[in-house]
Image (cartoon, rainbow, N blue to C red):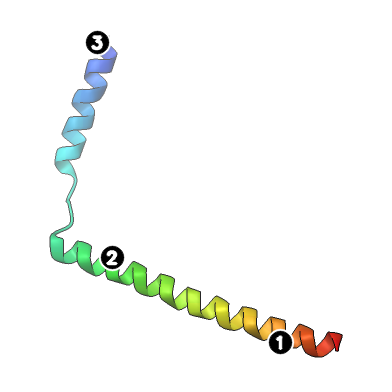
Amino acid sequence: MQRMTGFFKNVRLEMKKVTWPTRRELTRYTLVVLATIAFFLVFFIVVDFGISTFMKLILE
């Protein structure tokens, strides 16, 4: 039981050392993630369309 109590004390101490992002940073990071997802979404749609069109030309 003492080891578990020591573990949670250490966890609490380490969590106090964490630098949490500000609201502005968190918003910026979220927008970067959403923009990256949108970029890859469009990229894979274009690649899929290109491959599909190429395959239709080959098979016809």
- State which tag comes first along the sequence, 1 or 3: 3
Which residue was labeled with disc 2?
30
Label 3 to label 2: alpha-carbon separation: 40 Å
Count every numbered label the image shows and give the total: 3
Q: Which mark is residue 26?
A: none
Front-lying residue, 54 or 15? 54
Location of residue 7 in the rendering, given as x and y in whole percent from the top left corner:
26, 22
List the residue tagged with mark 1.
53
Quadrant in the picture for residue 49: bottom right
- Of the two numbered discs 3 and 2 on the same chain, state the one appearing first in sequence: 3
The residue beneath circle 3 is 2
Q: Residue at x 23, y 19 (%)?
A: 6
Q: Earlier in the sequence, mark 2 or mark 1?
A: 2
The image quarter containing residue 17 is: top left
Q: Amino acid at mark 2?
A: Thr
Q: Compare residues 41 and 3 and report the one nearer the observer.
A: 41
Q: Secondary structure at mark 3?
A: helix
Residue 32 falls left or right of residue 21: right
